[in-house]
Image (tube, grey):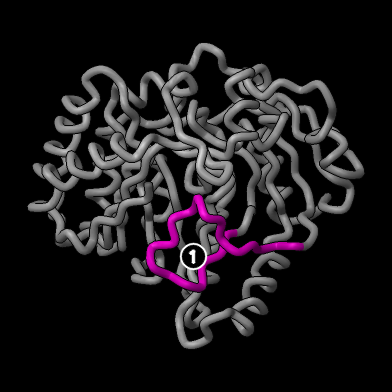
Amino acid sequence: MSYLPNFSHIYIESQVKGNDLASQCIKRFPRAKIIEIIDYKSIFNRPNQDFQTQKKSTKLILAKKNPPFIYPATDILQDGGFRNFYYTTPVINCIYNCDYCFLQGMYSSSNIVIFTNIEDMQNAVHEEMKSRPFPTEPMMLSISYNTDILAFENILPLTHEWINFANNLDDLHLEIRTKSAQIDAIKDIKPSNKILLAWTLSPDSVIKDHEQKTPLFQRRLSAIQDMLEKGWAVRLCFDPILLYPDWEKDYQHMFQKIKDNINGDQLFDITVGVFRMGEDHFHRIKRKKPDSNIYYNKYVNKDGILSLPENEKDKINNFVLENLSEFCSKDKIHFWM
């Protein structure tokens, strides 16, 4: 069963009243109190908000997004070899609550904003494709950079909308990053090699301690098996791999379960990353989450990004290769350190 937040309040901008997606969303939560507003920022950007306190009773905000609609990928994003790599933000914030997520350092509010003018975003993608830096190469668009969009599919069919859009546009590929097991909502869609489902996997010990409200490992693995059998392109993301007592034992156990249940040759690729975060976000989150041991490890500051020392990165690199190089071709294992 998928986690579904129970929104007690829905704020809606006057300009999106009557919008199809907004109307669908309001019908999904008939008991919610509907509050009309002029600008979503008047709620989302209010002073003296506390991200974690709001997580206990998250509110939903329906709004119209203004330009820019798409953005070139940042250095922290894994581009997967696509030189035309962009991201868009159909949704701000996530229904999950992972300790290491940068969103809690970026925003003071954990309320969720859904932008309902999806056509404007898609038109902007269409225009950007005409002027992409490498015109003979396809464009990869991440639609879940600031959220887990698949986890919202039982609220609104946003993933459906984007997949259908990409399938009707030559040279556009989508990356859908997720921890969700909410695959029933997209099972009716014909698999396409232009759509990359990128699942983040962690041992259950990490999920229980640091990935609150997310599905446990086995549910994610079952979803991956199902989608691979149907012919979808799937990426496995071990990102971030966290260091703690017995981390090698836990990750090795997880890797073995994967090898026992998945054919590595069927995978699009595997990406591996360590904890990394901009120093401003890091210190902001550390103040808000003093009980999370993630923020008390020894990190190195390189160009404003905090991450593990090189010897620790090498240790993780070697550990992953020892466990996965026979399962999946080395040229399909990419490290983001």
Residue displayed at 56% across by 56% down: 74
User: Residue furthest toward the top?
Assistant: 291
Left or right: 251 in relation to 91: left
Q: Which residue shows up at 71% across the image and 51% down it?
A: 115
108 horizontally vs 90: left or right: right
Above or below 64: residue 102: above
Residue range of the region highlighted in magenta in the rendering:
68-87
Residue 31 visible in the shown view: yes
Report x, y in % for residue 132.
Answer: 59, 79
Determine if the magenta segment contains residue 106.
Answer: no
- Residue 299's quadrant in the figure? top left
Q: Residues within 10 Å of mark 1 (few under 14, many from 20)?
A: many
- Residue kind at label 1, given as amino acid type: Ile
Q: Nearer the viewer, residue 68 or 181?
A: 68
Which x, y percent locates residue 31? 70, 27
Please tell me which residue is depicted at 52% across the width and 34% down the height of the picture: 101
| Residue 295 in the image: above or below residue 68 | above
Considering the numbered disc 1 on the image, is that residue within a helix, a strand or a loop?
A: helix
Q: Position of residue 32 (x, y in %)?
A: 72, 28
**83 or 227: nearer the eye?**
83
Residue 261 visible, this orientation: no
The quadrant in which residue 19 appears is: bottom right
Residue on which the image places disc 1: 163
Residue positioned most to the right:
38
